[in-house]
Image (cartoon, rainbow, N blue to C red):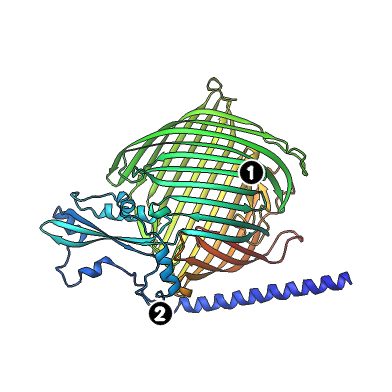
Amino acid sequence: MRRVKCQSQCYARTVMRDSLIAMLVMILIGLALVSVGPVSVLAQTGDPSASNAGERAIPSATELEAQGAIIGKIFFDKKNVFDTTQPGENKSLFRLANRLHIITRDSVIEQQLLFQPGDKYSKRLLEESERLLRRNSYLFDVKITPVRFENGVVDVSVWTRDLWTLMPGFSVSRSGGENRSRVSISERNLVGTGITLKLSYTDDVDRSSTSFEYLDRNVGNSWATAFFKVADNSDGGTTAVSLIRPFYALDTRWSAGTNYLDNERIDSFYSLGDRVAEYTAETEFFNTYAGWSAGLSGGWVRRWTAGIVFDDREYFPVPDGELPTLVPDDRRLIYPFISYERLEDQFETTSNRDMIGRTEDLFMGTRLSARLGWADEGFGSDRDALLYTFSASRGFGAIKKKALILSSVLSGRIDDGDSANTQLGIGASYYNQITDKRLFITTIEGSIGDNLDLDNLVELGGDSGLRGYPLRYQTGDSKILITAEQRYFTDWYPFKLFRVGGAIFADAGRTWGSNPVGEPSLGWLKDVGIGLRLGPTRASGRDIIHIDVAFPLDGDSSIDSVQFLIQSKRSF
């Protein structure tokens, strides 16, 4: 009887799985057909330039700058979550949401502008101010435009649309064959001030955690960011505090900050998706720094930063642990450091790349950085060590047509004359914008490690890009992951709450090198799959909901023939 029952249940699961796959295939075909149809222009409601219709034409940005135009008045055209003058948005529920929502204060928006009345008009500063404002999770989009010009004075309108920021919720996500649940309540724009408060409970494969977070990106209208987090976890706890005044703009002349972290947790080693060993990690980290710059000159920014780091990491066996113990070596590094960054002023604005129907700001210039630190036993370190990090990135082409973005980073230590924890990472992303509704993207990500710290091994699986396999399926000191994806963007706008897209994808990757636990590398692993993408347009944040079905083409016989993934990511 038990065998018959099992067969019945397995048959039911198979029918359910095949039905879901068939439904996703049909929807993806529909998305593909929609994507090649006529492209409609999405009108942005509340465009302040509309009020200037019929008046004397405003000179172009180049002409305004050539004439030495001065900024006069700054108008704030703030829109609520829903525009009830538009068809489909004049609903009782949406009107109630607008009444309950406290719209962002003028002062919060004004403080993030890089210009003020009396300044010379600068197209660059208007565009950079737009980028700064769009970073906020409580704003959907921003438009800053000249609306009136007379006698050498240009008035400017700042148009914004708010997002709903009070988010009570329950969510369940799945990746790599494991579930993750969360119950939370958060407010990302407390009474219109831009302050974030969040209380949440999460339960995943690693631990359960109850946490509280506070974030203010503009303390006292000073550009300073204050962050605080405390978490009570099933395997320890976390306290994190930071106060930072960043290089918030290209022409910013100084920065300073301090960070503190106290964390205790149990970490595990994985093989073929299963936990095979574990250890307890206790981390205490503190740094403080100051930076300076001559500002933007000739299209480039150069920044210097110096500071001090205290990094103490201790590792222990897990008390009464159920798994074998494998404990990394302790590290105590106390060191001064100096860093240099060179940044090119080259940004592009697009949409339908990593988001659906939203403005995206992309850096397409050159960025170079280097950081050196020296830890000494005389400072309290447990060794003499040179710590280094070098990185570079560059964009080529035009993001709205064909573009290639390259990046690399080299980091590591020289401990008492020996190379340690050396890691070279590379990345390449190629974008081909076929139409406004179709984008083909290929990415290559890889890292090569040598003598890595035991707590810094690389992993590859369903939670790290190889979508058809269990999480943390392969481990080593080096890895490579190649992804090809055809993305579809539609005008489908269900309930005026989220936009819909889809993807057909293929992944291939492998690890190699030292693996102190588990089985040797299985070589190249490949998968193919399809998925839906949902882009919320009313809720705060910039996350995309992924619903994927992936089919592994390799791997051992124990893995499922299909993986279902439901998760939220910051990218399409």
386 or 287, nearer to the observer: 287
Query: How far from the left and from the top, in percent, is residue 504?
Result: 56, 69
- Residue that carries the numbered disc 1 in the rendered image: 457
Residue 280 position (above or below residue 559): above
Q: Nearer the viewer, residue 494 or 479?
A: 494
* In the rendered image, the vertical position of residue 345 relative to residue 328, given as above or below: below
Residue 144 location, x and y as percent?
Answer: 28, 59
Point out residue 265 in the picture as x, y percentages from the top left corner: 65, 41
Which quarter of the figure is the N terminus placed in?
Answer: bottom right
Q: Residue at x 23, y 53 (%)?
A: 122
Please identify the quarter of the rendering in which residue 567 is found. bottom right
Residue 135 shows up from this direction: no
Q: On residue 223, which mark appears?
A: none
Residue named by callout 2:
38
- Residue 481 place in picture, x, y as percent: 58, 55
Q: Amino acid at mark 2?
A: Pro
Decide if residue 520 is on the left or right side of residue 509.
right
Work out whether residue 55 can be spotted: yes
- 525 is higher (above) or lower (below) than 234: below
Q: Residues within 10 Å of mark 1 (few under 14, many from 20)?
A: some
Badge 1 marks a residue whose secondary structure is: loop
The amino acid type found where label 1 is placed reads Leu
